[in-house]
Amino acid sequence: MTDSPDRADAEVQRTALYDSHVAAGGRMVSFAGWELPVRYSDVADEHRAVRTAAGLFDVSHMGEVRVSGADAEAFLDHLTPNHVAKLAAGRAHYSGLLTERGTYIDDILIYRLASDEFLIVVNASNIDKDVAWIEKQAAAYSEKHEAADCRVENVSDQYALLALQGPRASQILAPNTDVALDELRYYGFARGTAFGIDAIISRTGYTGEDGFELYLAPAEAPGMWRQLLAAGASDGLVPAGLGARDTLRLEAGMALYGHEIDDTRTPYDAGLGWVVKMAKGAFIGREHLVVQKAAGTAVKLVGFEVEGRGIAREGATVQVDGEAVGEVTSGTFAPTLEKAIGTAYVPASLAEPGTEISLQVRRRTLSARVVTMPFYKRPRSS
C-alpha cells in the first residue's frame, strides 16, 4: 500500500528527514502533499540494491490512526473485511476500508497493539478522508450498540516511519536492536529499541523483499536514519526513493491505491479476495461482495509483459483484435526482470495467462501477453 504521486496540493509538507534527504542529494518531488525524494542516484541502481542487499526508505508521510476501547475489536471487524478478532497482539494484517458497495476507500494495515488498542496505517493522500470515514462509522456503531466504547484518534504527527528492506536488512538491524528479529514472523511486530531509540519494529514492507518498518517519534528519525545507513554501509545499504519503491512494488504485484484499487474496484476485482472473510459475519460492503462472489467478476486485474521494446504506462488502452477492452493501471521497466511489465483491468474472459493482447501507447501499438502475478518472488534462502 502507498500513494500515487503528484497532485496539486495547496500546502506541501515535509517529513522530519527532509534535511537528511537534501544533504544526501535526494531529488525532491511533490508526492501526495509531501516533499519527498524520488531518487538519490539512479532508480534502477536503488531498485537492484534492495533486491540484492538493502535499501532505506522514508515513508513518514503515511498516516496512523489509533482505535482503542473495550469495543474496538468488534468495531474494526464491522469496519473492515479481514478478521480482526483473529489478530493476536503483536500481529498485523492487510485489509481495506470499503464503501457499502464493497469498493475501496483505501487499503490499510491494522496492528494490534493490545487487547483493546489498534493502530491503522493509511495512505498519506487519504488521511483526512479515512479519518473522517472511521470517525463517522464509529459514531454510528456506538449509537447502534448502546454507547460502545470505541475511540478514534488521528496520531499521524506522532510517528515517523522508516522502511529497511532487502535480503541483508536483518543482519544490518539485528546487532543494533534489542528485538529478537529471528523470532519476528512476517507481519509480526514488537516494541523495543534500535540504536537506543524507542520504536515499534514490524516485519512488513512494500518491496517484495524481507525487511522491517520502524515506527518512531519524528524527532528521533534523523538519528535513526543516519545510524542505519552507517551500520549498513558495508552491507551495501543505500537510501532509496519513491521511484524504486514503485518499481519494486510492481514487480512484487502489490496494489497501489489510485491505480489498481479505488472507489470503483472491489477486492475481488483486484485479486485481493483473500482479505474478505465472509464467515466472520457482517461488515461494511459485505452484502455487495456476497453477490459479486457468487456471480463472479466481470473484469479482473491481470499482469502483463511487453514483448519487445516499449513501456505501457497508466492509462494506455488494452486492445484485442483492434477493439478496446481495458486500461493499464500501472506500467514500468522492471530492473530485476529486465523487461517492461504492467497491470491492467480486462474482461474476465481475457485473464488467462498466455492471452495475447495489444497496448495502445500514443500512436504506437505494443504486443504483450498476460502473465501470472507476482512478476517477482524473492528466493526462499533470503
Image (cartoon, helix red, strand yellow):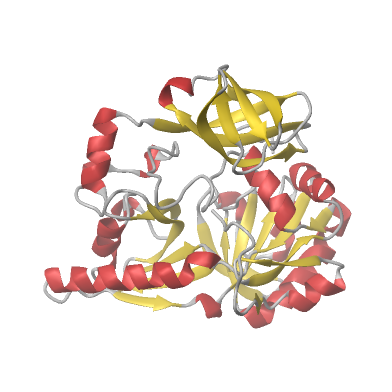
**Residue at left offset 63%, top offset 79%:** 218
Q: Is residue 88 above or below residue 145?
A: above
Q: Is residue 314 above or below residue 128?
A: above
In this orientation, which residue lies closer to the viewer: 36 or 30? 30
Q: Is residue 24 above or below residue 333?
A: below
Looking at the rendered structure, the number of numbered marks drawn on it comes to: 0
Question: Horizontally, is 297 left or right of 308 in the view?
Answer: left
Give coordinates of residue 10: x percent, y percent.
59, 78
Question: Horizontally, is 46 left or right of 342 in the view?
Answer: right
- State the residue lying farthest toward the bottom: 219
Give coordinates of residue 67: x percent, y percent.
36, 71
Q: Quadrant of the C terminus?
A: top right
In this orientation, which residue lies closer to the viewer: 48 or 52? 48
Give coordinates of residue 72: x percent, y percent.
28, 67
Instruction: Tell me, yes or no, if residue 373 can be seen here.
Output: no
Q: Is residue 296 above or below residue 91?
A: above
**Residue at left offset 54%, top offset 20%:** 353
Image quadrant where residue 23 sits: bottom right
Question: Horizontally, is 115 left or right of 62 in the view?
Answer: left
Give coordinates of residue 80: x percent, y percent.
32, 55
Instruction: Tell me, yes or no, if residue 355 can be seen here.
Output: yes
**Residue at left offset 34%, top offset 75%:** 152
